[in-house]
Image (cartoon, helix red, strand yellow):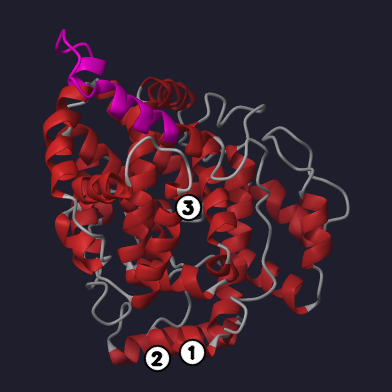
Amino acid sequence: MSNLSRRSVLSLGAALGLVSVAGTAPAWAWSPAGSMAGTGTGTDPWWVWDDEVDALVAGLIDTGQVPAVNTALKSWVNNGDPLPGGLPADLTAYLQQVNQLPSWADRDKLRLAADFNRRKDTYLFMLYGLGSGIMSTVIPREARSVYWSAGGANMQDRAAKTFTFGYDLSELTAFEPTGQFLVTANKTRLVHAAVRHLLPQSSHWEAVTNEQIPISNGDILVTFHSLGTFVHRKLLEWKVPMSAADEDAFLHMWQVAIHLLGVRDEFIPKTWADADAQSAQVLTPILAPTPEGRELAQDLLGLTAQIDLGVTRGFLNEFVRYVLSDAIGDWLGLPRDYAAATLIRTVWPAYIAFREGLIPVAPAEFYLFDQFVRAIAMLFLNKGTSPTSTPITIPTANRPGA
């Protein structure tokens, strides 16, 4: 989108008093005093995008250069890899600039976060996969953007790429030269820029949203809260033992991650208390069902059900309800299985307590839950499809027919 048209969008939004999609996001009132920057400009994140990379990627799409760029980027995998040849000079210059940690990143905290991910991977896999993944389908802006973009037409591929992002972030070497998350984050940033250019060209997407440009800084913050903040809160709720240093490191990992996705430091929460306050403003009030979200949820649960989980589909549905809420389960039309619901609510807390050494005797259904957890973990570790890497590529079109 050109600078002129973007300014027009901002002017229109200001004139109408809009800050986001009607009914899905409240006015921005979170104080930047609670951010990594500690201060701010007063700018609303719902009207902040990623101008430099947006202009670059729009140019690549409009001039037909994306296939060649995707081919060149395929060999760029590890954080310490040199940028491949064959990229346009302006894209190379941009990636050289952003493919590094922010000045405030603490490598010791990032290493502790990696170790925390290893120690608590059982719960993280479950919460990211059956919690955050399904929650994304009741975030209206996210569900509609995913559905009408190219990824919505092939949810197995889309899920695999999402798992790749989570897997690379959770790896022990995620932020080291031999790790892959910096590269993965920057490739994801390129994809976001492409979607911002392409989706406004979709009449189908325009028909269901009041949003002129998708994936603003505000939208990325919402996604962060559906992942990091939600998971942290559930770990506390499930009484999973964590030290204060563990919790701080886990937050720091996410602070760095969303910075790498282009979120301004003035919007990134500094503490979990700040994150909870922001989440209560930008995530909780907007959760709602949409036709697109219900279809995506069924696709995602269908993909999960194809794996040998060792449990029934009713058990899977009830675990989603247990993690998210019965209200969300009802929105998504998940059939009830009251026997499974009772089993989960009774045994899961005991399963956690036994795994954490808090009780000496395993619950009677330990094997069932262990098999279920292992299957979800393998789905995550296999990045949704297979153990091979799923390349993140820049799209050149929206959902077919959109």
Which residue has dot 2 on it?
12
Residue 160 sits inside the magenta stretch: no
Separation of residues labelled 3 and 1 (CA atoms): 42 Å
Which residue has dot 1 on it?
8
Q: Quadrant of residue 19?
A: bottom left
Determine the secondary structure under disc 3.
helix
**Mark 2 crowd level (few <14, some 14–19, many ≥20, 10 Å Cα):** few
Quarter of the image with the N terminus in it: bottom right
- Looking at the rendering, the stretch of residues picked out in magenta corresponds to 352-375
User: What residue is shown at x 82% (from left), y 52% (from top)?
Assistant: 72
**Residue 195's spot in the image, x, y percent?**
57, 70
- Disc 3 residue type? Leu
In the image, residue 171 sits, relative to residue 24, either above or below, namely above
User: What residue is shown at x 37% (from left), y 66% (from top)?
Assistant: 45
Left or right: 210 in relation to 285: right
Mark 1 touches mark 2? (CB < 8 Å): yes
Closer mark to the observer between disc 3 and disc 2: 3
Separation of residues labelled 1 and 2 (CA atoms): 6 Å
Left or right: 186 in relation to 290: right
User: What residue is shown at x 13% (from left), y 48% (from top)?
Assistant: 338
Which labelled disc corresponds to residue 303? 3
**Residue 40's spot in the image, x, y percent?**
34, 58
In the image, residue 198 sits, relative to residue 330, either above or below, namely below
- Disc 2 residue type? Leu
Determine the secondary structure under disc 1.
helix
